[in-house]
Image (cartoon, rainbow, N blue to C red):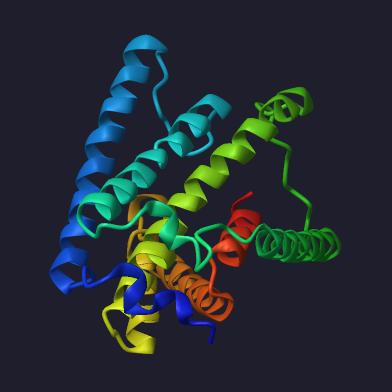
């Protein structure tokens, strides 16, 4: 494993358990209150009310932008609690490896295209094709929003990667946490935050398990490459 980036010297002696827990608490507080203020401001100034993920392009854009406040929380906690810059979480060069990002995104896109095409073909031949195009999303509207929404998807997945594969994984490793602890703990929390019974119903537990396994894979990829680039690319490709 290319684990040099997780050596304690990268973060000094400021990766104690109490600092990590306090950091998570502060990041959560910053995100919750900032997001609340963001949505209140949108409601009053632009009359945008979130009625469901992707119900309209504007709703989706507003929701995705709220993940910026996780970036803000991580940046403030890293600077004032752990005394290192945000970009120390990217990798040993303090930069995102964009080549790894493109490889990860390309693999995710290729896998998605193959799987979706296969499912569509199988469904067409074996079942009655009852799927209908969304009448609210025209080709013109999709083309108008695809670039800004893609940029905001990067904000969203970047926030999750910086929190779970950046902040948590790296600080646990830096304080001498065992290899599997540093993988399973961030991945379990990642899965727990995707548990949503009102939306997924009885499948909520399976979705949580799915995202936990995805988190383990992303942690292993991050440890193997020693950089967040590949994990960012895979996550971006899947969500996009």
Q: Is residue 130 left or right of residue 191?
A: right
The residue at 54%/68% (across/down) is 227
The residue at 37%/71% (across/down) is 170
Q: Nearer the viewer, residue 203 or 138?
A: 138
Q: Is residue 14 left or right of residue 65?
A: left
Q: Is residue 33 above or below residue 218?
A: above
Give the quadrant of residue 106: bottom right
Q: Is residue 209 above or below residue 53?
A: below
Q: Is residue 233 left or right of residue 113?
A: left
Q: Is residue 216 above or below residue 87?
A: below
Give the quadrant of residue 138: top right
Q: Nearer the viewer, residue 122 or 173?
A: 173
Label tally: 0
The x and y percentages for residue 63 are: 44, 35
Q: Nearer the viewer, residue 116 or 23?
A: 23
The x and y percentages for residue 222 are: 52, 73
Q: Is residue 139 left or right of residue 150?
A: right
The residue at 38%/46% (across/down) is 71
Q: Is residue 123 visible?
A: yes
Give the quadrant of residue 68: top left
Q: Is residue 204 visible?
A: no
The x and y percentages for residue 157 are: 51, 52
Q: Residue furthest left?
A: 18
The residue at 50%/66% (across/down) is 91
């Amino acid at each position: 494993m290319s684990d040099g980036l997780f050596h304690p010297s990268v973060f000094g002696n400021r990766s104690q358990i109490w600092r990590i827990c306090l950091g998570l608490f502060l990041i959560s507080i910053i995100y919750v209150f900032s997001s609340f203020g963001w949505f209140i401001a949108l409601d009053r100034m632009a009359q945008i009310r979130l009625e469901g993920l992707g119900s309209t392009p504007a709703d989706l854009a507003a929701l995705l932008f709220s993940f910026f406040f996780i970036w803000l929380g991580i940046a403030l906690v890293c600077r004032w609690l752990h005394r290192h810059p945000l970009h120390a979480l990217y990798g040993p060069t303090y930069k995102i490896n964009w080549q790894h990002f493109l490889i990860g995104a390309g693999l995710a896109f290729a896998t998605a295209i193959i799987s979706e095409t296969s499912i569509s073909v199988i469904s067409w031949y074996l079942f009655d094709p009852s799927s209908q195009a969304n009448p609210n999303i025209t080709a013109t509207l999709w083309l108008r929003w695809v670039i800004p929404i893609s940029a905001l998807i990067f904000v969203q997945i970047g926030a999750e990667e910086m929190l779970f594969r950046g902040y948590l994984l790296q600080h646990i490793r830096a304080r001498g946490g065992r290899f599997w602890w540093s993988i399973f703990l961030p991945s379990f929390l990642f899965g727990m935050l995707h548990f949503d019974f009102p939306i997924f119903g009885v499948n909520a537990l399976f979705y949580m398990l799915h995202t936990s396994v995805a988190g383990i894979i992303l942690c292993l990829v991050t440890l193997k490459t020693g950089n967040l680039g590949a994990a960012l690319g895979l996550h971006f490709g899947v969500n996009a």
